[in-house]
């Protein structure tokens, strides 16, 4: 029955979108947001339908910084987080990934959008995903400060777009075909590459033919391969290849323009590049600490480290683990979250130094009354926009309400950080805890219902009239049962219990967000610096590189 309603809603949404009835669309979205589905699969599809509605509304807003622009991304991600998402057809899953890619593209988050296109193509041969990826690759190429890297992104885009335009009649319906044909710059790009492909390939050979940096030892090679496969290097080329050439954290900031000021020395003038280098180094250390944890012998079998010898600990009977690799994961998580604090201060000092009680990654964008700063609203820098929307998925300020965050997983990341730093935090074995906790939860719920029923029964007895001596005994029973419930409520949320698998997954997810933030910061500052013209009061000064 739920599937029938979802299908009807999907058809209705398509009808409203085609008719461009915005008032009706807003009302229908409100209706869908009130739907309560038992099936996770139905919830996933419902979120997707709502996301499509918000995607159309986003086109009617005057600014890409508008609060409501983020809602389409939030809904598409909620669809993916549902366990029932995997039950959707490959075609529908691919559409969710593709639409999320397009939504991220509108927010300037080009690298994240590319990943969603890859997911869409991997699960279903969706021609729109191929077109979106080709378009994204070209847009990335136009924004890179390294011309050689830009050509490689164009080489990746060429076969995708060539395929689209050579087979368009068999791939698209009339409506989509009209959209594809209107994209004349991409047609011209394919023609250009058709003419010069051999010469381009000669000047820019395949990655496998180029010398890379695979590592000097077996351990280093294994580590670098893991980083490449998980796309973790601060290198734009790692988005399109896992060859050793991309195994370097090469992205940085432009050479500084040293202002003539007798009060500021050369070292002080390098504050921006120095701060960025500190963040890169901290990220790299967190990345290796994570790798060391998941690859260590302690994570693969029960082996005790000598640091735990003669350490007398309580067995909490919930399969809690006290292992060295778990502590390394915690360290990695803390370091990664701290990178956002440092990025916030760097951006604050670079963009618009002013007065604020506390700088967060989430509030560096706002002026008074939590309004986005005018300089940002008028900026054409796509990577500042990307950083803003990425910040809306990193819950680093408890003062913000739940609705501020555009990713439902943001609260989970924040809860882990807060409990790691300030509260109770316990890591348990995934497989064993899930079995035992399900049993304990069902038992506790049954007991809770039993106690509530007993309280209600005793209250009715008192209301029905009993002797005072009996009344006193019954009231004592009620108070006893109420104290049991109160004691349980006091323990709610303490400690935060998380499985070892979830801690690994959440830390890796956070790591990827930090990497995107570092890359976007590098490209945003390059973009800004290119705007500055020459000045007689400025001396160009090449940033010196630290050698290990």
Image: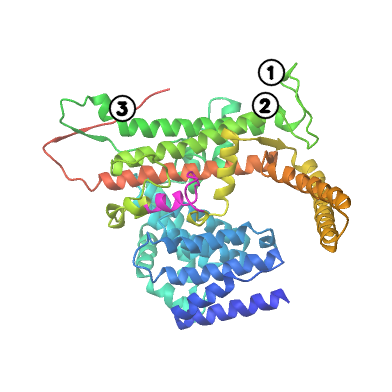
Quadrant in the picture for the C terminus = top left
Q: Mark 2 vs mark 3: which is more N-terminal? A: 2
The residue shown at (59%, 66%) is 47
Q: Residue furthest front?
A: 468
**Above or below — where is 56 with respect to 366?**
below
Using residue 377 as the reference point, say whether residue 27 is left or right of it.
right
Q: Quote the CA–CA distance across marks 2 and 3.
A: 38 Å
Using residue 483 as the reference point, say whether residue 187 is left or right of it.
left
Pick the front one: 207 or 457: 457
Residue of label 1: 307
Q: Mark 3 vs mark 1: which is more N-terminal? A: 1
- Tell me the tag on residue 88: none
Residue of label 2: 324
The residue shown at (53%, 67%) is 51
Give the SS element for disc 1.
helix
First to last magenta residue range: 385-401
Q: Quote the CA–CA distance across marks 1 and 2.
A: 9 Å
Q: Would you say residue 393 sits in the magenta stretch?
A: yes
| Label 1 with label 2: CB-CB less than 8 Å | yes
Q: Is residue 161 visible?
A: yes
The residue shown at (72%, 67%) is 38
> How many callouts does the rendering have?
3
Using residue 543 as the reference point, say whether residue 309 is left or right of it.
right
Q: Would you say residue 88 sits in the magenta stretch?
A: no
The residue shown at (23%, 48%) is 531
Q: Is residue 230 visible?
A: no
Residue 165 picture location, percent across and down: 45, 70
């Amino acid at each position: 029955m739920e599937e029938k309603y979802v299908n009807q809603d999907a058809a209705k949404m398509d009808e409203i979108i085609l008719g461009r009835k915005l008032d009706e669309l807003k009302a229908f979205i409100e209706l869908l947001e009130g739907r309560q589905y038992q099936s996770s699969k139905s919830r996933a599809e419902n979120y997707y339908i709502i996301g499509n509605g918000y995607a159309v509304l986003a086109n009617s807003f005057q600014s890409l910084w508008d609060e409501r622009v983020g809602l389409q991304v939030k809904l598409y991600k909620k669809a993916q987080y549902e366990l029932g998402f995997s039950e959707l057809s490959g075609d529908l899953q691919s559409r969710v990934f593709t639409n999320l890619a397009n939504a991220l593209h509108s927010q300037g988050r080009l690298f994240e959008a590319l990943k969603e296109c890859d997911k869409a193509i991997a699960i279903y041969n969706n021609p729109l995903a191929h077109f979106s990826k080709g378009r994204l690759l070209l847009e990335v190429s136009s924004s890179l400060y390294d011309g050689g890297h830009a050509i490689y992104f164009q080489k990746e885009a060429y076969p995708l777009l060539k395929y689209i335009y050579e087979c368009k009649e068999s791939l698209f319906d009339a409506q989509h075909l009209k959209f594809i044909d209107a994209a004349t710059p991409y047609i011209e790009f394919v023609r250009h590459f058709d003419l010069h492909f051999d010469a381009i390939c000669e000047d820019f050979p395949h990655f496998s033919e180029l010398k890379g940096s695979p590592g000097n030892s077996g351990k280093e090679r294994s580590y670098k391969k893991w980083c490449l496969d998980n796309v973790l290097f601060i290198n734009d080329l790692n988005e399109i290849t896992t060859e050793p050439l991309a195994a370097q954290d090469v992205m940085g900031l432009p050479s500084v323009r040293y202002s003539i000021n007798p009060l500021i020395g050369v070292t002080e003038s390098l504050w921006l590049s120095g701060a960025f280098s500190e963040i890169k180094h901290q990220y790299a250390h967190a990345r290796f600490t994570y790798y060391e944890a998941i690859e260590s012998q302690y994570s693969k079998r029960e082996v005790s480290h000598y640091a735990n010898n003669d350490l007398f600990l309580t067995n909490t009977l919930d399969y809690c683990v006290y292992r060295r690799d778990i502590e390394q994961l915690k360290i990695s998580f803390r370091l990664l979250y701290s990178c956002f604090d440092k990025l916030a201060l760097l951006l604050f000092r670079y963009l618009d130094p002013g007065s604020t009680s506390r700088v967060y990654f989430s509030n560096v964008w706002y002026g008074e009354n939590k309004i986005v700063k005018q300089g940002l609203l008028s900026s054409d820098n796509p990577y500042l926009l990307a950083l803003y929307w990425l910040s809306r998925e990193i819950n680093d300020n408890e003062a913000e309400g739940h609705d501020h965050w555009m990713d439902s997983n943001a609260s989970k990341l924040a809860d882990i950080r807060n409990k790691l730093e300030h509260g109770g935090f316990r890591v348990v074995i995934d497989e064993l805890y899930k079995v035992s906790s399900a049993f304990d939860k069902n038992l506790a719920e049954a007991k809770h219902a039993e106690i509530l029923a007993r309280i209600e029964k005793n209250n009715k007895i008192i209301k029905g009239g009993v002797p005072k001596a009996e009344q006193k005994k019954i009231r004592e029973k009620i108070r006893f049962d109420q104290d049991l419930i109160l004691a349980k409520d006091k323990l709610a949320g303490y400690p935060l219990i998380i499985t070892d698998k979830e801690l690994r997954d959440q830390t890796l997810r956070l790591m990827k967000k930090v990497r995107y933030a570092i890359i976007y910061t590098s490209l945003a500052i390059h973009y800004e610096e290119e705007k500055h013209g020459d000045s007689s009061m400025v001396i160009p000064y090449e940033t010196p590189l630290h050698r290990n």
